[in-house]
Amino acid sequence: MALEIVAGCVNCWACVALCPHQAILEAQPHFLIDSDRCTECIDAHATPQCAAICPIEGVIIDELGTPLNPLGSLSPAARDG
Amino acid sequence: MPTPTPPNTAAKASGCASGRCGSSASQIDELDASVAQRVQDHPCYSEEAHKYFARMHVAVAPACNIQCNYCNRKYDCSNESRPGVVSEVLTAAQAVKKTLAVAAAIPQMSVLGIAGPGDALANPERTFATFAELSQRAPDLKLCLSTNGLMLPQYVDQIAAYHVDHVTITINCIDPDIGAQIYPWIFWKHRRITGREAAEVLIAQQQQGLEMLVARGILVKVNSVMIPGINDQHLKEVSRIVRAKGAFLHNVMPLISDPAHGTHFGLIGQRGPTPQELKTLQDECAGDMNMMRHCQQCRADAVGMLGEDRGAEFTLEKVEAMQIDEHAAMGRRLALRAAIHAELAEKRAARHAASAQVIELPRPAATLGRPVRMAVASSTGAVIDTHFGHAKHFHIFEVSAEEIRALGTCAAAQYCGGEADCGEADNTLARTLTALSDCEVMLCARIGIEPWGKLEAAGIRPDGAHAMEPVASALREAWKTMLDNGQLSVAPASQRRA
């Protein structure tokens, strides 16, 4: 059970220090999640920390490929409507 | 795939374009005396200091814990640093090494700041590890940091423990309904919160952090981004409140919303203020508070004098190869600072004397010697630190018994650009000599034999005897030497030739 970072990540570092298991790897072209370390935070927090701070929609996905921050979920316009 | 970086023309803007240098030298004089004492070496806080002192930012703080609608996290924070560019992120150890290298090469270095590229306090380990090491190894450097304020109350004690001099908080509003239009979300207590609730938390944290810093005697500057139609009228209220709480400066900056930067405001066509709108608001807020008008919105890895960026000279690779005598470097900084303080104190005294004077006394009828125009090769105008052949420009002064008058700068046709350019050397030197034809003396750190001869032939006496000395004292000495030699009772050589 692990999350995955996919293309679109802008390497902003926000998730790196928050991960309770140091599972985020600095890499090119984008950061990666070490699937052996990632627990999706179920043992540590109410919500996966990387996804809770990630500023980019759609770049952190679960094992089913579902984005934790779906398209439109972070944009100000979406919430206004 | 690398993302394209939008054009960054603003970064090339010169440091002292007249339109950006709105603050008067006397502005610092008007600050509370104890505050003035503490900001006198800080290039960001006084127009006077920014001509003499250099600062650098180290990009150790990439992460951010809030989203601003004027920011695209692909690039550096568009408030605390230049938007649309990406800094090379440093570890604390790399940042310390780079700072010591820069401070050894640029003795004007007086301030080390952490301003991003994200938020200094969203990266507390890197930020405080950098401060801890530098406060031991370069205790003469002033430390400062910029933050959105969200985590400020939690870290005020650490900020005080490392003797951080100045903290900048970006405060765009004190009304959560306005905040909700600027901040779509924040990361708070391990989750993301949005809308008005997010703005309420952020504003409360900022205001509490401001109060706690002031209570500990740490200088607080407030930055605000002026967003027409959203917080422009509101910022007058912000200015009043933050001043009442003890912030010593309020810096209102224009929204930058180039669609190419991909920010929310950029994409929806939210415009920035016109220069006139910005000035009007700054004037209205200035009634309440000292403003800084020469702010350059520097990037998070800026190095050098305000408006110049010498970052390319100090890449990680180059810094690794440098051998640095930290102790000797600190000695040079302290000596230079003492010389500059003496010069500034003299200027301040002269300014106060001038404003107190009611009746203008007649000048002595007979002056001892005629005024002389002199050119100075100096990177900053403060110290004679430049080789004649390397100077990009010369500072021109008119020196007389009574005063040293700065006449501006004159661009040099660069003479020595390395061997490849040397075929051109004669031509460029001739162009430079034409530009300097009014001058009788060329004060520079060093000069080659050939240009020496040509300068002399053109009636300009090269003088390398004052290398690394403050400009003002060197000018006075050069003038006095001419006086003692009896050269000032006759017309300049150029007029005699004519």
Image: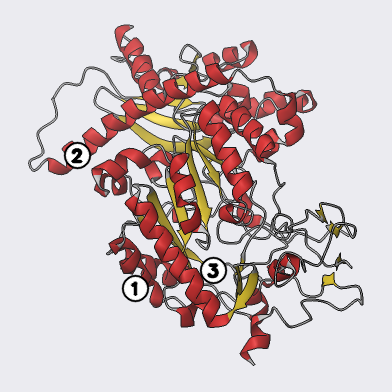
Numbered tag placed on residue B237 in the rendering? 1
How far across and down, in percent of the image, does residue B9 sit? 65, 56
Judging by the rendered image, the residue that carries numbered circle 2 is B352
Subunit ID for the residue under disc 2: B
Q: CA distance from mark 1 to mark 3?
A: 18 Å
What's the residue at 41%, 55% (across, down)? B221
Q: Quadrant of residue B397?
A: top left
Please state which of the two labelled residues, at mark 1 or mark 3, is closer to the viewer.
1
For residue B87, side relative to residue B288 (left or right): right
Mark 1 and mark 2, same subunit?
Answer: yes
- In this view of the protein, which residue sits in the foreground, B338 or B196? B196
The residue located at (35%, 15%) in the rendering is: B477
Looking at the rendered structure, the secondary structure element under dot 2 is helix
Residue position for label 3: B255
Pointer 3 indicates a residue of which chain? B
> Are there few (<14), some (14-19), or many (20+) residues within 10 Å of tag 3?
many
Check contact, mark 1 vs mark 3: CB within 8 A: no
Q: Secondary structure at mark 3?
A: loop
Instruction: Answer whether labels 1 and 2 touch (C-beta < 8 Å).
Output: no
Report the residue that reaches farthest toward the right.
Answer: A64
Res. A75 image quadrant: bottom right
Calculate the distance from the C-alpha at mark 2 to the C-alpha at mark 3. Answer: 37 Å
Q: Comparing marks 1 and 2, which lies closer to the viewer?
A: 1
Asked whether the beta carbons under mark 2 and mark 3 sit within 8 Å of each other, the answer is: no
**Kind of residue at disc 2:** His
1 and 3 marks on the same chain: yes
Could you tell which of marks 2 and 3 lies nearer the N-terminus? 3
| Mark 1 to mark 2 CA distance (whole Å) | 33 Å
